[in-house]
Amino acid sequence: MINKWLAGLVALSLALSVAGSALAAQAATGVSSEFTHLLFGVKDGQLKVFHLVKLKNQGASSSGPIELSLPKGYQNPAFSGDAGGAMAKEVQLGSEGLKDPRGLEPGAARDYVLTYDLPMPPDGQSLRVNVNYPTQMILILADQATVQMVPLQNRDFSSQGSVQYGQKTFEQFARNDVAPGTTLTMTLGPATPGGAQPGGAGQPGGGMAHEPPPGTVTKGTIALLNQAFHGGASNMMMWQRFTGTTGHGGLVGSIIILAGLTVLIFGLGRTFYVRWQLKQGINPETGERPEETFEKLLKEKSIYIKKIADLDRKAEAGEITSEEHQERRSAYKRRLVKVLARLKEVEN
C-alpha cells in the first residue's frame, strides 16, 4: 500500500514540476499584444487594409524572432512611419506574414504598422488570420461607405456599434483576450446602399477621390485607432496570466514547481518516517509502541469500569434519577466496549 501511494505521489509531483517548468519557460519569452487594429475600406475594387499590431516583451529574457501572420494574397505592402526605410530593411515579408529577426528585449515594445491591398470580388472577401501572440484586444473598423462585415459570417467578433472619424463612419467589431494559435475569420462584403454616408463614395460633395482611401495612413490615423475601443478589454485572459505575458506567469510557474517539490519532499519524508516507525515497532497512527498502547487501554478499561460502578452506587443511593443513571451508564458502556475491542486487537 505504501509503495503504491509513494508511486502516485512521485507521479503527481513530477507532473506539477513539469507543468510549472513549462509555464515558467513560456513566461520567459513573455511576448504579447496589447491590441491589434485592422481598418478596412474599398477603393477601385481593392480592399485597402491598415494593420497595426503593438507588441511588448514582459518576460525575463529576450524573445526569438517576431512573426506576425497576414492574410494570404496581400499585395503592395508598406510600413507606416518607416523613417529612412529602417523597418523595411530589417523585416522580412513573406507570402503569409512578416518576420523580424531582431526579436524583443525584456521590457521592450514595438509597433508594426502596415498597409496592404487585397482583391475585393463583387461577392465579398473572406480573410483568415492566425493570431501569433496572446492578444488583449482585436479591433476591426470597417468603412461604412464602402465595406461591411457580413454579420452571420463573423461570429468571431462582436459588434461595437459605429464611430465617426472625420467625415467617415466606421462600424466597430471587437474580440477580447485571444489566445495564440487562434485562427480568426473575417468576411467582408460591399457596403449596402443604406450604409453609404453623406460625403462618402458616390455622394455629392464627397467620395473617395477627395479623401485618402481607408487603407491609407494619415497623420492622425494611428492616434485615432489607438483611442478607438482602447481599454475595452479590462479582463485579461487566464491564458495570459499563466504564461507570464502580463508578468504573472513566471511567478505562477515557480509556485507550481515549488508546490510540486514540496509535495514530493513531504511525501518522501513521510514515507521514510512511517517505515522507520514500523521498524521501531511504533504504530504510525498513534505514534505509540504496542506495549504503550496496551497499558493505556488497560488504564482506560479500569477508568470506565470504575465510572460504571460509581454510577450504579449513586443510583442505589438515590443521588441520581433512574433516567440519568441509564443514559450515562449506556454512554460509559459503549466506550468500554470500544476499549475492550482495541485491547483484543493489540493482544492479537
Image (cartoon, rainbow, N blue to C red):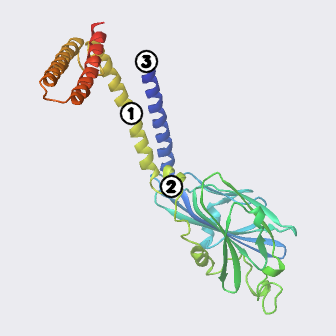
Percent across and percent down for residue 336 are 25, 18
Q: Residue sitting at 17 percent across and 16 percent down?
A: 302
In this picture, is 10 found above or below 342?
Answer: below
- Which mark is on residue 1? 3
For this orientation, the residue located farthest to the bottom is 205
Q: From the viewer's perspective, tell me whether residue 118 is left or right of residue 296.
A: right
Q: Secondary structure at mark 3?
A: loop
Q: Residue at x 34, y 30 (%)?
A: 266
Extreme residue toward the top, this view: 348
Mark 3 residue crowding within 10 angstroms, few (<14) / some (14–19) / many (20+):
few
Mark toward the start of the polypeptide (2 vs 1): 2
Can residue 52 be seen at all in this image of the molecule?
no
Query: x, y percentage for residue 227?
Result: 57, 76
Front label number (3 vs 1): 3
Q: Name the residue: 13% across, 24% down.
A: 314
Q: Which quarter of the figure has residue 174?
A: bottom right
Q: Residues within 10 Å of mark 1 (few under 14, many from 20)?
A: some
Residue 97 % position (x, y): 69, 58
Amino acid found under the numbered disc labelled 3: Met
- Neighbor class of circle 2 (other Cα within 10 Å; few <14, some 14-19, many 20+) is many
Residue type at mark 2?
Answer: Thr
In the image, which is nearer the foreground, mark 2 or mark 3?
A: 3
Instruction: Classify mark 1: helix, strand or loop.
Output: helix
Q: Which residue is mark 1?
A: 263
